[in-house]
Image: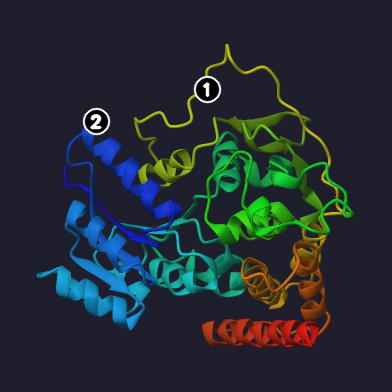
Amino acid sequence: MSPTRVAIAGSTGSIGTQTFEVIEAENARVPGSYEIVALAVGSSSAAVIEQARRCSPRLVAVVDESARREVAAALAGVEVVAELAAVVGPADVVVNGVVGFAGLAVTIETLRAGKRLALANKESLIAAGPIVQPLRSVPGAELVPVDSEHCALHQCLRSSVAADREVARLLLTASGGPFRGRTAADLAGVTVAAALAHPTWSMGPKITVDSSTLMNKGLEVIEAHELYGTPYDDIDVVVHPQSIVHSMVEFTDGSTVAQLSLPDMRLPIGYALGYPDRIGSPFGRIDWTALERLDFEAPDRATFRCLDLAYDAGRCGGTAPAWLSAANEVAVDAFLAGNLRWNEIPDVCVGVLAMHDGATPHTVDDVIDADAQARRIARDLLSKRST
């Protein structure tokens, strides 16, 4: 049997490097199961060169021009291009691990080509839901979520043969991040290092900060609505600090089905690569004799305001989720650069959403314009704060 051909967009990031680990484990178990045929990065030339020497891809996409020249010089015989979405062509499965709105083109082109999209880039679905949804009906197109929570929901919903009629609500679990239990006053002087010290997950800086503000969970609420069509009133968030229960589905008869595993992103990556089958490498296996407790509590919505901002943007619809995602990216970048306090991140988002024009996107260009407009407003607000 021929190997499954995999492209990894964002190959040098957290999702990308763990995808390598999953594929190497599966190929060690069953030689020739997977072939990595394409890689894509923004500018990490040295890292992608090393990866390419490990897997011998047919194509490497590098956005930054200087880095692209360096990669082309180092990888004789490999096609080196500028567009991230070029990785879709040679692949059967595309892992979209690009951070932020930059991953939109990969999402669009993978579904448009009728291929399986292993989606870790939640922003592209959140910002462009009205554009992405019709593409999911393209023959052959599949969207399998790589977020641990949405992968969990995907697995729970598979347990019901009539999930569209029997689901009462979706429950997304949140670790609570590094600041769980802290008050707004406690968090007035949060440092970048403190925000990046996640208690259970190892992730990139942007998503780690989002986890600390609960914006990540809010965006996941929007993503769950887009993925499964569940109304916002039927999507709840519960804080679960152990990160063992990754999400739950409650059915109309009161039964709840949950997916449990140790926190290991290689499990949802492997689930997406192998779908509809399961891979044989047991990432996240639990030692049930060592698992002492599972705790759950309600999120502190007053301190972590970003959660309700996401619900508000999702219910507003149109380009509001795109505006929120863009505003948050700008605010988080400013925080990481030391130009904004942690507790001011939601203030920037509030200011941007207050100016939302109520538009509905009909094309990809509409989404791109909405993103750009929200970023301009966010930067203007930041500029005014600094004067």
Q: Nearer the viewer, residue 165 or 104?
A: 104
Whether residue 228 appears in this view of the structure is no
What percent of the width, then of the height, locates residue 92? 29, 57
Mark 2: which secondary structure? helix
Mark 1 Cα-neighbour bin, 10 Å: few <14, some 14–19, many ≥20: some
**Quadrant (top left, top right, bottom left, bottom right) of the C terminus:** bottom right
Q: Tags 2 and 1 in contact by the CB under 8 Å rule?
A: no
Say what amino acid the circle numbered 2 marks: Arg
Q: Which residue is painted at 55% across and 49% down in the image?
A: 147
- Splitting the image into 4 quarters, where does residue 356 fall? bottom right
Q: Which residue is painted at 54% across and 68% down in the image?
A: 100
- Of the two numbered discs 2 and 1 on the same chain, state the one appearing first in sequence: 2
Instruction: Residue 29: give its label.
Output: 2
The residue that disc 1 covers is: 286
What percent of the width, then of the height, locates residue 139? 39, 63
**Quadrant (top left, top right, bottom left, bottom right) of the N terminus:** top left
Q: Can you say whether 343 is above or below 180 in the image?
A: below
Mark 1: which secondary structure? loop
